[in-house]
Image (spheres, rainbow, N blue to C red):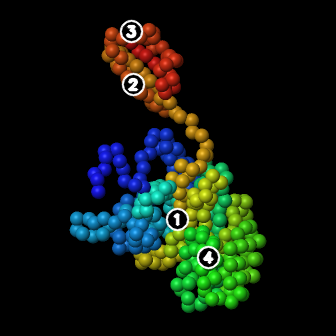
Amino acid sequence: MSKPKGFEKPAGVRDYLPHAVTKLRRIEREVLACMDRWGYRQIMTPTMEYYDTVGVASSTSDQKLFKLLNKRGTTMVLRSDLTAPIARVMSSLLKDEPLPVRLSYHANVFRAIEEEAGREAEFFQTGVELIGDDSTEADAEVIALAIESLQAAGVERFKIAMGHMGYLNGLLQEVLPDRTLDQENLKQDLLNRDYVGYRNTIASLSLNQEQQDQLEGILRLRGGSEIAEQALEITSNELARASIEHLRKVWEVLEAYDVSEHVLLDLTMLGDFSYYTGMTFEGYAAELGSPVASGGRYDKLLQQFGRAVPATGFALKTNRILDGVKGEEIAEDLPILIRYTSSFRKAGLAKAAELRAQGNKVITSILRDSSTDSVQDGEAVSGSLLNKGYREVITLK
């Protein structure tokens, strides 16, 4: 393998130039402020965790974890999400905190990827966790907050697709009892949105026509609240039917929030983490084909850290919003330039301090004493210097 050139960087990581950082920080600031208004307190966790605790609990496949060894030979990982680290904190440092607990975060996460277009090994997430509340009100709260957070991030046109892990699990248990491998193959097809593959898998299972119709019927379960009734007609499984009743109640709360116009039911949808146990959802922006938000209920995750507490939450995929959603144009905040000769250094720096105290961006630059610049002392100028990116130029000489 050849030695990398000085300007090269590893696949899947990127440099953020000033204009991108400005937009990223605006998204971060506005979204976290939105979450704060809903009572979510910000938390920060380490970039590096133990593989045997957070690494295993994250449900990110081993192939996608960045692993490294510390000097004692212990396997560490770079965090692949924030939910598992927060579960660790809730079971230790915050174990005595009165429930429910509402936490928010903005951080970079790492997942090893194949070298393919559009995939990143390091990216940013902004999200929340609502811990200690297993009610439909809690599930509806995180969806309503996800909607408001997307709006705060500048995403104008989007839809939230809401599903439930229990519905598909119940249906598969009814049609394919004790056929775990076949169930997992069908789930993988749905997770990949490979509906042709899903139908082909059904055709390979030697099922009768009624069973095939049941499994294929789920592909039509996408739409408004009327989908709930159609879903009940497909299965008599108790888990599946209870899941639909739960979604109906969540929908009622979303109507009370007056945000149901942004939501649709999609019972083909599976969360991309195995720790999801109930309601799941994804947010899709009109400009993008891939999700800009995802979340759901994960009532068993904290058990892995010794605390059986229900939880639900979501994360915005901040990089996708940054790169793919136009959003609100951000006017560049140009600095003021103060130029001075050595004789006017003290006055120039004092003027810069005064303007900075007023909230202005100020750059200072010394002029050669022999300068023949025709600008009068203290005069603000326009012209070529202003065209080079300064809001105002003040010359003291």
Amino acid type of the residue that numbered disc 2 sits on in the rendered structure: Thr
Q: Which residue is pictured at 49% across the width and 43% down the height?
A: 20
* Foreground of the two, 290 or 282: 290
| Residues marked 4 and 1 touching at CB (< 8 Å) | no
Instruction: Tell me if 250 is positioned left or right of 384 in this view.
Output: right
| Residues marked 3 and 4 touching at CB (< 8 Å) | no
What is the quadrant of residue 339 in the picture? Answer: top left
Q: Position of residue 57 (x, y in %)?
A: 43, 73
What is the quadrant of residue 348 in the picture? Answer: top left
Q: Is residue 236 visible?
A: no
Lower sequence index among marks 3 and 4: 4
What's the CA distance linking mark 1 and mark 3? 63 Å
Quarter holding the N terminus is bottom left
Instruction: Tell me if 19 is positioned left or right of 329 in this view.
Output: left
Q: Position of residue 310 (x, y in %)?
A: 53, 74
In the picture of the structure, the residue carrying the numbered disc 2 is 364
Q: Which residue is pictured at 46% across the width and 40% down the height?
A: 18
Q: Nearer the viewer, mark 3 or mark 4?
A: 4
In the picture of the structure, the residue carrying the numbered disc 3 is 372
What is the quadrant of residue 314 in the picture? Answer: bottom right
Instruction: Tell me if 40 is positioned left or right of 47 in this view.
Output: right
